[in-house]
Amino acid sequence: MYYNERLKQLRERVGNTQKEMANILKIHKGLYSHYETEDYIMPIKHLNYLCNYFNVSLDYIFNLTDNINYKLYINKDLNKELSGKRLKEFRKENKITQIKLSLLLNTAFSTISSYERGVNSIATSFLYTICKKYNISADYLLGRTNDPKYLK
């Protein structure tokens, strides 16, 4: 997913150890270490928390842009309902069925439906795949910002 280098750089920039970052996220140091090396995929709620902690965009952490932050955040907390609405809007704009998106993500179409209904937060790997393939902002899809919607 390519977020490990940016996480490490941000952590080192503020002078924190992996143990301190783990304490911030209320997880074990070993788990944080696995997240930072991308042995395990960090859940979106933790990535969102770190974006807020470092005051950076998720698009920056995902290495989708070099724009470290956006001027206007409308919501720094995750909003499953808004995220689901935006995912559905994006999918319809691009004439992508739930089945087609589920095939791209190698998941059940009911998973896509649960995201769009705001039942679950979108999985980090799925969010990254969608953003990378369609150049759409992760921050936009999660409802963190209204602009930019699409990345250049």
Image (cartoon, rainbow, N blue to C red):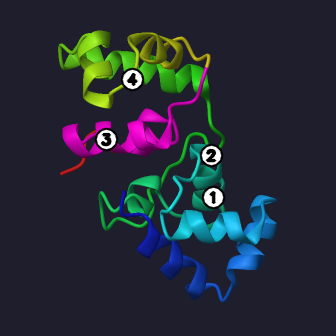
Q: Residue at x 62, y 16 (%)?
A: 119
Locate residue 61, reporting x and y percent.
Answer: 44, 62
How far separated are the C-alphas under marks 2 and 4? 28 Å
Quickly name the residue at label 3: 129
Residues at discs 3 and 4 in contact (Cβ within 8 Å): no
Q: Which residues are magenta?
A: 120-147
Q: Up-down: is 140 above or below 152?
A: above
Image quarter hosting the N terminus: bottom left
Give the residue type that dot 2 points to: Lys
Q: Nearer the viewer, mark 2 or mark 4?
A: 4
Quickly name the residue at label 2: 76
How far separated are the C-alphas under marks 3 and 4? 12 Å
Q: Nearer the viewer, mark 3 or mark 4?
A: 4
Quickly name the residue at label 4: 107
Q: Which mark is residue 52?
A: 1
Q: Toward which corner of the image does residue 51 lie, by quadrant?
A: bottom right
Give the residue type that dot 1 points to: Asn
Taking the image as drawn, is residue 55 in sight? no
Instruction: From the viewer's side, name the closer residue of 4 and 67.
Output: 4
